[in-house]
């Protein structure tokens, strides 16, 4: 018996016992094969943003099917303007982010959020026309809409139809 508790044999037996225990644990422990993306509710962030800005806030009326809201924040932009960020994992597991601000100049805000100042066309979403921007090196697509009170930007690695899907559910909430 002493031969199994000392020297090489003792080491080999201890290693075998540890590996067997780890293998048994991996066999019986529940495992998920699906990717888990944390879901973050943005309703309070949108409400707080609405109290901080002098215009009716734009927000999704509902989340597009299969999309997971996974980030949100309010930040200071240029000249002290408030900026709302709502991030999503799309149904195709790409990234899309909706931002809005009344930062001036509006073109500067749009260019900063889209990482591009060059329009590559337009996209019709319902009855609304959005400007398309594309940054090749980052594979970043953006839809930009500049309104008198606020600039809206939807950007990310999602394809044009997915970005348009997010644009289609945006609604302006009344100020108040």
Image: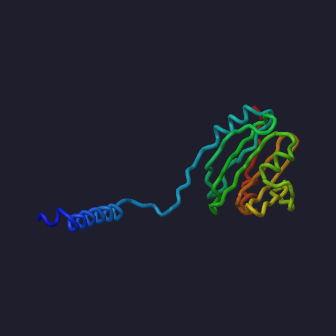
- Image quadrant where residue 118 sits: bottom right
Q: Residue furthest front?
A: 7
Q: Position of residue 14 (x, y in %)?
A: 24, 63
Q: Is residue 108 above or below residue 123?
A: above
Please indicate whether residue 9 sits to the left or right of residue 115 in the image.
Answer: left
Q: Residue at x 42, y 61 (%)?
A: 31
**How many marks do you count on the picture?**
0
Q: Residue furthest left?
A: 1
Q: Residue at x 72, y 42 (%)?
A: 84
Q: Position of residue 53 (x, y in %)?
A: 77, 34
Q: Position of residue 13 (x, y in %)?
A: 22, 66
Q: Nearer the viewer, residue 65 or 36?
A: 36
Q: Nearer the viewer, residue 145 or 14?
A: 14
Q: Position of residue 172 (x, y in %)?
A: 77, 43
Q: Residue at x 57, y 49 (%)?
A: 39
Please indicate whether residue 171 sits to the left or right of residue 65 in the image.
Answer: right
On the rendered image, what quadrant is the N terminus found in? Answer: bottom left
- Image quadrant where residue 57 sits: top right
Q: Nearer the viewer, residue 60 or 19?
A: 19
- Image quadrant where residue 135 sits: bottom right
């Amino acid at each position: 018996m002493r031969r199994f508790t000392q020297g090489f044999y003792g080491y080999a037996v201890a290693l075998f016992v540890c590996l067997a225990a780890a293998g048994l644990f991996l066999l019986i422990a529940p495992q998920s094969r699906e990717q888990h993306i944390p879901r973050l509710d943005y309703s309070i962030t949108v409400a707080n943003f609405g109290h901080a800005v002098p215009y009716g806030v734009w927000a999704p009326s509902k989340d597009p099917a299969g999309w997971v809201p996974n980030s949100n924040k309010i930040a200071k932009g240029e000249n002290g303007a408030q900026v709302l960020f709502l991030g999503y994992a799309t149904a195709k597991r790409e990234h899309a982010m909706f931002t809005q601000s009344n930062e001036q100049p509006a073109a500067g805000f749009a260019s900063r959020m889209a990482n591009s100042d060059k329009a590559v066309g337009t996209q019709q979403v319902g009855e609304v026309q959005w400007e398309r921007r594309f940054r090749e090196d980052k594979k970043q697509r953006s839809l930009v809409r500049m309104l008198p009170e606020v600039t809206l930007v939807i950007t990310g690695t999602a394809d044009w139809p997915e970005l348009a899907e997010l644009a289609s559910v945006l609604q302006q909430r009344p100020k108040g």
